[in-house]
Every structure is written in structure tokens, then in C-alpha cells.
Amino acid sequence: MNSDLFTRAETAAAFVWSQTTLRPQVGLVLGSGLGSFADDLTEAVRIPYSDIPTFPRSTAVGHAGQLVIGKSGDVPVAVMQGRVHLYEGYSAAEVAFPTRVLGRAGIRALVLTNAAGGINVEYGQGALVLLRDQINLQGQNPLTGANDERFGPRFPDMSYTYTKRYREIALEAAKQLSIPLREGVYAAVAGPSYETPAEIRFLRTIGADLVGMSTVLEATAARHMGMNVMAISCVTNMAAGIIDQPLVHEEVLEAGRRVMGQFIALLRAVLPRIAVELPQAG
Ligand code: HPA
């Protein structure tokens, strides 16, 4: 890779801008089985990741691999239908690269979604959980290496990874829509094997309510760039050992599809409310 990350992000962002006149400030990343939110956007332009200069391509089943720029109601949004993961062989910096591009393209508020295993026994399959905080157990960080101050500071604060005001907005919207929405702490592991029951006992002990293989690197890069972040997990399965049943990826995708209606309704209600509470451009 010859050109530096910042120049790459600028080039990719310029390409995205060349494809549409919309200039969204709100971005979304749709996780496994949660991609169909992007199908209902109006004025939509769909850009395959393979068309965007130097963009990594997602190989995971259940991830479409395109950036959709369109409108959710009146709100212009940039929606990543599918993401890349460490387990596909990408470095942490590459996993976070699309987040960098969104940031350089003008996104100030990022909504991350994912499929996760439920560790907290109060959750059931299909529960929607708003992230309150995260534990990065992936063993990597997208900010490793020389820091580029054009993105952000060397040692970004992570005390408020998930914007408190956005959490309040999401909880209020869920209440109004009578959609059950819990809050929890998300632990990210590298995967791709699911956890062992012993690992899940460990994760519960250290304070995790959910486990998954994504989100934390994107949230870290987004905070580095001064974006506000919100994240919602869909509990597609209870984590290993919580119920005596093996985990199957197809079931994870299917569980996501079952709560899709609620999930989409919640996003539709939340987006206009966070769009009016954006941070200053970095
Ligand atoms: N573990 C890790 N990642 C996941 C799970 C899980 O149980 N379910 C969906 N993504």
C-alpha cells in the first residue's frame, strides 16, 4: 500500500461524493442479517464496495457489500450494507477504513449495528440491545502505528464511546414505539469460531452482556475522528453454553430477519432525532 491512509480515505470519499448530490451527515453500518434497512431508502444510489477506490470487500455471508446513499424519511444517510471483519484476514486499520471514509465524506454521527450472542440471561433471542460501552478483546486496535493528526489525537478518550444523548434518544423512541430495547456492554472477540462455554463464563465475569466479532474497531476509529456513535445489537442467539444447543450461522441470519420490522422502525425513528444533534465537524 503506497499512499497513506488519510489520502486513501480522501480519495475514496471524493469518489463517493461524485456518485450523488446528497451530503449525508449520518452514517449507518448494517450487520449480519440486518441489511434490508437500506432497501427502503429513497433517492438511493448504490455503490458496490468494489467500485470505491481502495475499499475492502466483505466476504461474509449475509453481507451485501455496498454503500447506499439515500434518504430515510427526510434524513440523508450513508448506509454500509455489510462490513469487513478481522476474521476475513483484514487488519484492524482496514476493518476501520470504511469508517474513515465515512468520516472524511462528512459523516458526523455513526450508527453501528450488529448480530451478537446474548450473555446476559435477561435477554432472549431476537432482543434489541443498545450498547452502553464496549470491551475490545480482539487484540488489535485500528490506531496502532504512527498517528495521523488529520484524523484525530494520538490517545483518544474512550470514556464516552457511545454518545449518551443518542442512547437517551434511542430509549425514548423505543418506548414510544413499544419496542423493547435493553442496554448492555458488548465484548468483541476476533472469531471466527464462536466462543466456548468457558469463554462465555469469562466474558460474563468481566462485565459483558453481549459478544460479537465487529463494531469495536469501527467505534474506536469513529471516536478518534470525533464522530458521535450509537450502536444496536440484535441478539441472534444466546451465547455458547447458556442454552445447551450448538450455534449455527444460518440461524443467526434468520433471527436477524425476524426482528427486522422492529429494528427498521426503531432506526427510522432515531435517525431524524440524532441528525439534529450532531457534533462539530472535526
Ligand atoms: N458470538 C460471537 N459473535 C456472534 C454471536 C455469538 O454468539 N452471534 C452473532 N454473532
Image (spheres, rainbow, N blue to C red):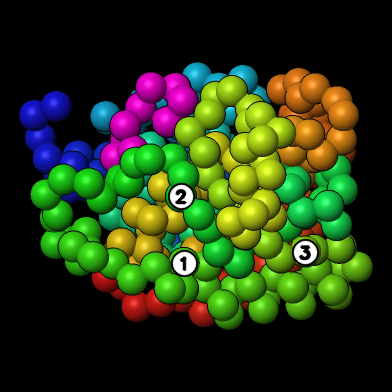
Label 2 neighbourhood size at 10 Å, few (<14), some (14-19), many (20+)?
some
Q: Which residues are magenta?
A: 86-94
* CA–CA distance in space, label 3 to label 1: 17 Å
Side of 279 relative to 128 (left or right)? left
Q: Earlier in the sequence, mark 3 or mark 1?
A: 1
Residue that mark 3 sits on: 182
Question: Which marked residue is nearer to the observer: mark 3 or mark 2?
Answer: 2
Cα distance, mark 1 to mark 2? 12 Å
Secondary element at image label 1: loop
Q: Of marks 1 and 2, which one's residue comes earlier in the chain?
A: 2
Image position of 202 with respect to 171: above or below: above
Image coordinates of residue 196 in percent, x first then y, are 66, 29
Is 232 one of the magenta-colored residues?
no
Answer whether residue 91 is magenta in the image: yes
Q: Where does residue 245 sit, x and y in percent of width and height?
A: 86, 25
The reply to whether discs 3 and 1 touch (Cβ–Cβ < 8 Å) is no
Q: Which residue is mark 2?
A: 136
Kind of residue at disc 2: Asn
Identify the residue shown where x is 46% and y is 25%.
87
Q: Secondary structure at mark 2?
A: strand
Q: Residue at x 79, y 63 (%)?
A: 181
Q: Nearer the viewer, residue 190 or 53?
A: 190
Residue lying at the far right of the rendered structure: 178
Helix, strand or loop at label 3? It is strand
